[in-house]
Amino acid sequence: MPNAVMLRSDGNREGETVGENTSLSVDRRSYLKLAGVAAGSASMLSGAASAAFTRRGIKFKRTVDMVADAGCDPTGNEPCDSKIRNAADDHTLLKFPPGEYKITEKNVILNTTNLGFLGEGDVRFTVPERYNEKMFVVEDGTGLLFENIDVDLRAAGATPGLHFGVDDDLEVHDVEYLGQGIHPNSDPRGGGNGNPAVTYALYPIIRSPDGTGTVSNVVAKNDGLMGAYNHGNGRVGVWIGISHKGTVTLKNCQFEGFPNNGLYCSRTGGAVQVEGGVFRNNDITQVRLSSSDSYVKNAVITADFDNSNSPNPGDTLNSRGVRFEAGKFGYRGASVENCDITIASTPHSSGGVVVGSDGADHAIRNTRIKVDVDSIRGVYAKAPVGFGNRGPPPKPHSTTLENVSVTGSASGADAVRIDQRDDSVVKGCCIDQNGGNRHGVRLVDSDGSKVVNSTIDVNGQRVVEDNTWVRTRNIDASGSCPTPNQGGGRLPHTLTIEGTGSRADYTFTVKGDLEKSTANGADRNDDDTISGQTASGHTSTGLDSYTFSGELVAFDLDGEAAVTLDGQSAHVGQRPDHVLTIEGTGSRADYEFTVSSNLSKSTANGADRNGDDTISGQTASGHTSTGLDSYTFSGELKRFVLDGEATVTVDGEPAHVGQRPDHVLTIEGTGSRADYEFTVSSNLSKSTANGADRNGADTISGQTASGHTSTGLDSYTFSGELERFVLDGEATVTVDGEPAHVGQRSDHVLTIEGTGSRADYEFTVGSDLSKSTANGADRNGHDTISGQTASGHTSTGLDSYTFSGELERFDLDGEATVTLDGEPVDVNQSSDHVLTIEGMGSRANYTFTVGSDLSKSTANGADRNGHDTISGQTASGHTSTGLDSYTFSGELVAFDLDGEATVTLDGKPAHVGQRPDHVLTIEGSGSRADYEFTVENDLAKSTANGADRNSADTISGQTASGHTSTGLDSYTFSGSIKRLNLNGSADVLLDGNRIDPTRY
């Protein structure tokens, strides 16, 4: 199976090392989530560019049906690899209808912006027997969606994987791996020599420090060979290594039965945030972390190998719960928060939470640990002395345990052991372990530590001070301790709405995942619906139940019902009615809105409480780009103004803020006629706002309006930005009642729209060149601006720019529709190039010759200086502190510079010192004329002034000879003409000026 490119390493292979391998698996999604995917895709157009749309915060402009448009075989008989690679493009969503799609290669896709893979219904990617590759390597771009696609590894010996590395905006959701990932040549409990490198399940990598990614509802029940660590090359669930620099969040995932860590995320300086989920019966470690801002929270973590589905659970090497370590890299500061950790049955484990000898400071909070296997500790923080040839980790080394319980029947050893970690803290903890010879907390060589406000009920010593002094206070010897909730269910909270006799309608929103439940005797009523994190329904005499993770953010109840949360009253009357969420799509979007009452910031749907967003009374204002802001409120959403693009939802449903324009633009005459023309981003329409009428003399073409006013006023509504405004005359122009400052805006909008195939372009304008979102364009990072010259490419999307002055030149390679202020532009009539000579302080004289169409220009801020002259295709002039610009087509044939100046061609250095000084042209007058001449240097034939390279003309050294009658011959050279003989009648021109050949 071919590999398209060699990729950079994801990590460092030292100590417990990791090979370049992967496989991925997931548990079955609920019907409701599948239905949500289909509904979200229903409006997308297949096989063509369409109106831009956003999914999971990623903006797309084109949808490809991978069967109807790309020709993939949904029966799984024919490979789909090349068709997927060919269809993958910027801003493109690849839709896979229900079926199986065969993958047989390692498919490498590089440098894309906003690429998506979306399964519609039951979609599976299958692989052949013994396939041990990354199915997809999507790298070096930004914006990647992979959603609702299963990976089928049930072929014998198959171990496929997925590698997704982007700068920002990684979204992986609802993926299932079907089958066991067991390489046929792996040797359980072997030393590693001769064992194969087995592909890992998933590499989710964010390469930019400011980038983010989310992986949710990915379940891989690998059920692999225990003991097949393979010297670090055994199969891993999730590997995140040193190339990860940003933040990736793993939400409600499930990874089981991997021989080389479930989540191996400790060799990275980026943040790895594990929220919810189940991690059980993996060898080596269930969850492995190290860096600051990294944590595992609200997760169920279990080692119970008596109930393992692996073929050889007895070969398990070390089934730790959570492990903190960083290899040689020195990362520090990770934490465990509100987790349920159980060591129920295992042949080998060094503890529920273990800190390696290369692990620095760490914290465990609000967590319940149960250990039922003898001689295994609940928490074991090893001495920070380094491992092998690695030195100690950086200080501090302290261990922090707050509100941690350790329970279970284990005997021997200590419930908690902390070695050589000064200033450690055990606070508010509860240890209840009554097995024989079991001590509570042992601290070894850990000066300055304390154990306070805790319950320690053990048969051995409560606190063991080994070569150290520990401060102890308020230690109780007995009491009950909270135990882990292993619950079977995936989601930790249960909400039940019980009717009291009359109909009650409800809508509520939670912060995490949400599912229907039969808890407390409820049934799954089809009249009740879930949309994202919001549920709505009704009950009268029955009851409805739901399970969810995170918080209950909002609850709106119309009628009477008894509502309980985890068996306790939910106090829904004290909660707001609605949740409003604004999710950025990549570029900055400013918003302002007003509600009826009880407005408050919220963390619903994963938002944070951004200090840049403000609330004044019942009005909120703020901005977002790639993140999201949430608010709760009661009553109605009264108004919403959005400047930019964002996805706005109320209670999980679209808020339709796009149906209300963002802005009102008004042009009010001052007495004399004023003509205007302007362009906006989108949704341009005439309006009667501020008392205007819809004047038939004013016109709209696309997003550009033109008209005139004298004593009256014209108004328009629009969304997005006012991109340009040109005013000829005097008028008062306002946007939303404020001065529009139209004199500070660009004159023109230029848009290049792709027609399906790649088109490359480059152009130069007079001044004020800038990227724009006009006409629905985005600011593509592949397009560049240098001074007043822009270059880029498009295929199915469009690029827009604003500028002032003139469009000096436009060079197009390929097919595209080019419009200027909404009108088509014939780019073939535009010159190919702009040449600019900028003085450096002292006088510089120049003469140059080009191929054709030479003309003076104001490009780059030049003026049309009367001292500079053009004769045919030759220009001459001088500059000192100013600059001169010219446009032309064809080639820059010759350039002679006397003095110092900066000369640029299309915004780049022209290297004029590498060009000949002069052009000599012999033009026939009707009868044959023979000539011969000799020059100093660099003699060459040329097409200057429309000449061709006639084979009858010859050059020997610095001497040329030939003849002409009705045509013309041109040559370039440097230095001077040594001699020139002309026999016949012809015009001889030197740099565009006629000369007398008898003088040479």
Image (cartoon, rainbow, N blue to C red):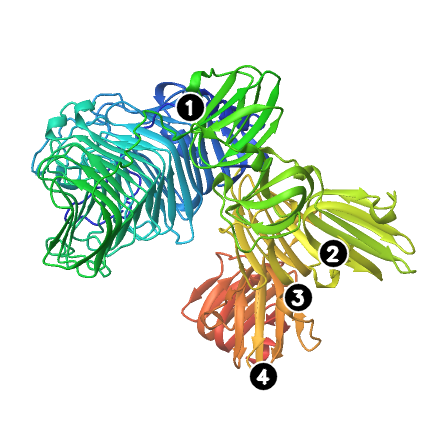
- Say which mark, if any, is on residue 843: 4
Look at label 3 and name its amino acid.
Ser
Between residue 564 and residue 880, name the one nearer to us: 564
Tell whether label 2 touches label 3 (CB within 8 Å): no
Quadrant of res 341: top left
Vertical relation: 153 (above or below) 753:
above
Q: Is residue 375 left or right of residue 68?
A: left
The residue indicated by pointer 3 is 857
Closer to the chain start, of discs 3 and 1, is 1
Q: Which mark is residue 72?
A: 1
- Image spot of residue 927 (x, y percent): 63, 61
Marks 4 and 1: which is nearer the front?
Answer: 1
Q: Position of residue 721 (x, y in %)?
A: 67, 51
Mark sitting earlier along the chain (2/4): 2
Considering only order in the chain, which callout, 2 or 1, is on the residue closer to the N terminus? 1
Above or below: residue 917 compared with residue 746: below
Q: Are marks 2 and 4 in contact (CB under 8 Å)?
A: no
Inspect the image, locate mark 4, and give the three-letter code of the amino acid beneath it: Arg
Task: Tell me if 800 is positioned left or right of 976 in this view.
Answer: right
Quarter holding the C terminus? Answer: bottom right
Residue 881 found in image quarter = bottom right
What is the C-alpha distance between the residues marked 2 and 4?
39 Å
Disc 4 to disc 3, how far (Cα)? 20 Å
> Mark 4 and mark 1: span between their CA atoms?
66 Å
Q: Mark 4 packing: few (<14 Cα in 10 Å), some, or many (20+)?
A: some
In front here: 722 or 605? 605
Q: Is residue 922 visible in this depiction of the protein?
A: yes
Q: Amino acid at mark 2?
A: Phe
Label 2 residue SS: strand
Task: Look at label 1 and name its amino acid.
Answer: Cys
